[in-house]
Amino acid sequence: MKKLHGIVVPMVTPLTLNAEIDYKATEKLVEHLISGGVHGIFVLGTTGEAQSLSAAQRESFVEFVGKQINGRARYIVGVSDTSIADSVKLAAVAKAAGAEGVVATPPYYFGPSQSDMVNWFTALADASPLPVYMYNMPSHVKVNIDPSTVVQLASHPNIKGLKDSSHNMTYFQTLCYLTRDEEDFVLFVGPEEQTAQAVLLGGAGGVNGGANMFPELYVKSYDAAVAGDLETVKKCQKAILHISTAIYTISGGPSSYLQGLKGALELLGLCNRTLALPYTAMPEEKMGALKEALAGISPQEWN
Amino acid sequence: MKKLHGIVVPMVTPLTLNAEIDYKATEKLVEHLISGGVHGIFVLGTTGEAQSLSAAQRESFVEFVGKQINGRARYIVGVSDTSIADSVKLAAVAKAAGAEGVVATPPYYFGPSQSDMVNWFTALADASPLPVYMYNMPSHVKVNIDPSTVVQLASHPNIKGLKDSSHNMTYFQTLCYLTRDEEDFVLFVGPEEQTAQAVLLGGAGGVNGGANMFPELYVKSYDAAVAGDLETVKKCQKAILHISTAIYTISGGPSSYLQGLKGALELLGLCNRTLALPYTAMPEEKMGALKEALAGISPQEWN
Amino acid sequence: MKKLHGIVVPMVTPLTLNAEIDYKATEKLVEHLISGGVHGIFVLGTTGEAQSLSAAQRESFVEFVGKQINGRARYIVGVSDTSIADSVKLAAVAKAAGAEGVVATPPYYFGPSQSDMVNWFTALADASPLPVYMYNMPSHVKVNIDPSTVVQLASHPNIKGLKDSSHNMTYFQTLCYLTRDEEDFVLFVGPEEQTAQAVLLGGAGGVNGGANMFPELYVKSYDAAVAGDLETVKKCQKAILHISTAIYTISGGPSSYLQGLKGALELLGLCNRTLALPYTAMPEEKMGALKEALAGISPQEWN
Amino acid sequence: MKKLHGIVVPMVTPLTLNAEIDYKATEKLVEHLISGGVHGIFVLGTTGEAQSLSAAQRESFVEFVGKQINGRARYIVGVSDTSIADSVKLAAVAKAAGAEGVVATPPYYFGPSQSDMVNWFTALADASPLPVYMYNMPSHVKVNIDPSTVVQLASHPNIKGLKDSSHNMTYFQTLCYLTRDEEDFVLFVGPEEQTAQAVLLGGAGGVNGGANMFPELYVKSYDAAVAGDLETVKKCQKAILHISTAIYTISGGPSSYLQGLKGALELLGLCNRTLALPYTAMPEEKMGALKEALAGISPQEWN
């Protein structure tokens, strides 16, 4: 099987008004993503609000999405937890559901040292029934997985890559350089604003939340970057920045990105805009501004 | 029942060499604490390595300790989690095990706003079968529960207090002042170096890790502060600082406190020094220095 | 001469409406402080907006205040800078103006390591014509002067103490313990909310901004703490917290403390509320709320 | 005159062994940079250790370098300070010395709000005799100049651009998008690891410290990016990452970059490796490792 690459969309978790998982909307969203051409679907990431869901909800969701995808896209599951036993438990569910890999941050309560992170990922990769992708997310986890730590872990046979959401392109480029000889190790960037640049200089792809709304755009930008077609990259990049500056900044505050994204998905008819407790949906009084912002975005921008 | 007060020891979780819960050592440690006169026992806090334990381990431990205490000390259980449903689930176990209250941080992965924290603690207190004590721990949770947020939550009938581990005494004094008319709301300080000062000016007590080793010292310091006996406070304070500067700083790094504390408990014959994955025990080559430091601490200092 | 102790007020720098130094108001403020019984006057600290003033303004101000004090209170000058040569230059001006010591943070642009801070304070103390007090201010300087660094520097013959504005009482207590045998080394705490607690357990005094408004209150609280008179300490502490919660929080934002303090000084007829560029005075529309808050504070609270 | 673009090297400040400015080495370094084809020379930035120099040293250095350049490269001067009057004073010196623009961070002691930063740059641009380039440097200044703040300031007739050293490529791309219609506003990126990516998608150039050593490499990479020649970009990028991972990481700690850079310049015969107080030069015992690292870097990599 080809190494993981391309647009692996961090799927939102559709919720009903009373914050139960909305399976009907989940079905619809998975179909939207597959028909939009995404290379993979990644559930239970930060965008998927994994940490707000109960352990039981996470397991059910992983099983449901696996059935729905049914082999039509690559399937990756987030198992980030502060307990390694519970991470491995969810990895087993993921495997049974047809996933090909799991994604995990370092533990995010008690701050680990760099050598604690080596222990963590080694133990997880040793025990996990699926290959592990590391997830660098310093804004949420408080610690950065240092380049030397990544290098040390990249040669583990069951560690296959890293997704970087640090927004730090120096870091990402440094990882690309330092792991250039690890054949089986791939590097993804989280922020959609950086995916084209990352791919132009060697990144494997992007885990881009905006692809929940407009999967074709992000796929097109990726394909153009792979082909070295700078004109198309620039056209797509402008649209991608239009989306991020118009949609993710409306409500302000720490949930602004997620409120904007789920609010837009509601307007697009894909799922409710509810966020899991304690976070709140885009407030009603701002939905007008969001509607207007969304109306200003058109596939003609990138086609 | 009298409001919670005094030394509520954040009990370590004794582990076997292969990181299973060590119930025999747990029994011994609980007896050590009760005979040392602590006012309460708090399990599954930061010192208790709660987040590193699996959900199943947490439940068993809560049940076991409740049976062991058997009403001889006040019993509080940490239920900090990023999922409110899983917090409430553990609170129910705590109640069945004889606990009188639960302690919870805000969710510690996705950063909550102040109003998200109001939502969080309100929902938790509404659903919890036991009274809730808030836990302010910005170094691990990334956010501070602002004084105005605390004031807003202090009047909730099922929220009974707050434990502050920010080390920020301005914050603590501000809370004391702003909640001075909330009859049923108590304020505890985490760091043992500050407990006497907090109690001298109105704090309810301390949640002091060092009390795992020398419970009488911290109880004596608390009693002296309540009585306004400054001479005794000063004598105890010197011993408390001797302990914290000698024991908690040996290994350096983020686990230094916990490595020193559990290492000392091993030397005192109370439990193994093992830490849960991915954290590591005080390394063998530093046990000599720890032994020497511990030998320099004697109850004669405070008696 | 007795070691520095008591309330050393971090004097604001009175400014005219167009942000020149207001020498007439400076005269009035110095007299207000001296008649209020403060033990010392400290100019060009954070509260004195030193960094916003030009090098030329700093020199003139130091000279003027020295003449005005004229030996009636102890006089300390802030010389914090990122260039050691310019710090020493200002220290010479301070000496000529009758100051007895200088206060300095570590350099605050390029982040120093702990050993860089040893170099910094050693070089400064070697070259300074006046004794040096170190200033720990991690919120503004980005780095904390670690206890082991303080211990290393405390024995320098020209380093006489440290002022801690970290708000971290664990840190302060640790310094008290570790430097307990340094006869000539004194520890001050910045935040006024903590001064009484610090002094009760061994601190030398407080550098409290609120003393610009009500010097007698802070002096009374200090005297009571020295005497171990807990009743008076508690009464004063309540008034101190009334002031800090009512006056310093009105405008919000990073300048809220300074806007409130200077706004109140304007209402008390002591000086204009102007802040130096780029910071802005308490806005006109909030002066009503400030007036009301100030009216609620009365010396009867603490007398 | 064409807008500022290309490789504007943040020149180190050569120092003698006793930390005086080394004018002879300065002459040599300026010639090295000009013959290496850099588009501009920027003195008194972070790499230039501006904050460690006295005000008098800064003025002399600005004058000397202006004479040495003598119109053969574009000349920019850092005037970052916490006092706006002193910034403007240095800007006047810069103009007299032949500089075409000045660069300034927000004030870096007392943390400014976003509107304080608007005040700051507006006042500076109003008073400065030379056009102003803003400098976003959150690791040293503690605050980020938010995109909306940049947009607000970009239309000021005397503000001509921004240099971003945040390492955050999402931020940089967002600025590119939001200021795309400001004809006279240019965006530079600080970190050399990101310059090619920034230029490929619209950035004006890079302020790259490595160009002190190997100016041709960075110029070649810039030219290739402007031309859309991805093959050459990739070849140069590999060499740029070779340099940054080999040279800047040897000593560790906050000065590691500067110690490596100045150490390499000493080995290249361009200037002494001395750093200004309180920072220390690459220690002698690590010069062997640096020499070896430098020997592994050869112009054949990029030619």
Image (cartoon, coloured by chain):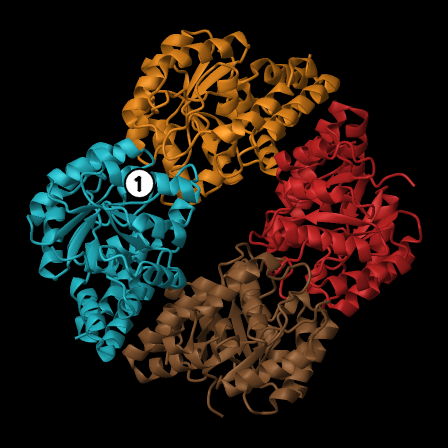
Chain colours: A cyan, B orange, C red, D brown
The residue positioned 87% from the left and 61% from the top of the image is C64
> Can I make out residue D141 in this image?
no
User: Foreground: D90 or B143?
Assistant: D90
Instruction: Tell me: residue B266, above or below residue C151.
Output: above
User: Foreground: D111 or D98?
Assistant: D98
Location of the C terminus of chain A (image quadrant): bottom left
The image shows residue B300 at horizontal and vertical percentages of 69, 13
Instruction: Tell me: residue D75, above or below residue C95.
Output: below
- Identify the residue position indicated by label 1 in the image: A122
The residue positioned 50% from the left and 10% from the top of the image is B32
Lateral position of residue C76 relative to residue D40, left or right: right
The image shows residue C279 at horizontal and vertical percentages of 63, 62
Mark 1, chain letter?
Answer: A
Lateral position of residue D243 relative to residue A179, left or right: right
> Can I make out residue B52 in this image?
yes
Instruction: Tell me: residue C260, above or below residue A62.
Output: below
The image shows residue B295 at horizontal and vertical percentages of 62, 19
What residue type is disc 1 on? Thr
Lateral position of residue B209 relative to residue C262, left or right: left
- Badge 1 marks a residue whose secondary structure is helix
Residue B230: quarter of image: top right
User: Foreground: C300 or B157?
Assistant: B157
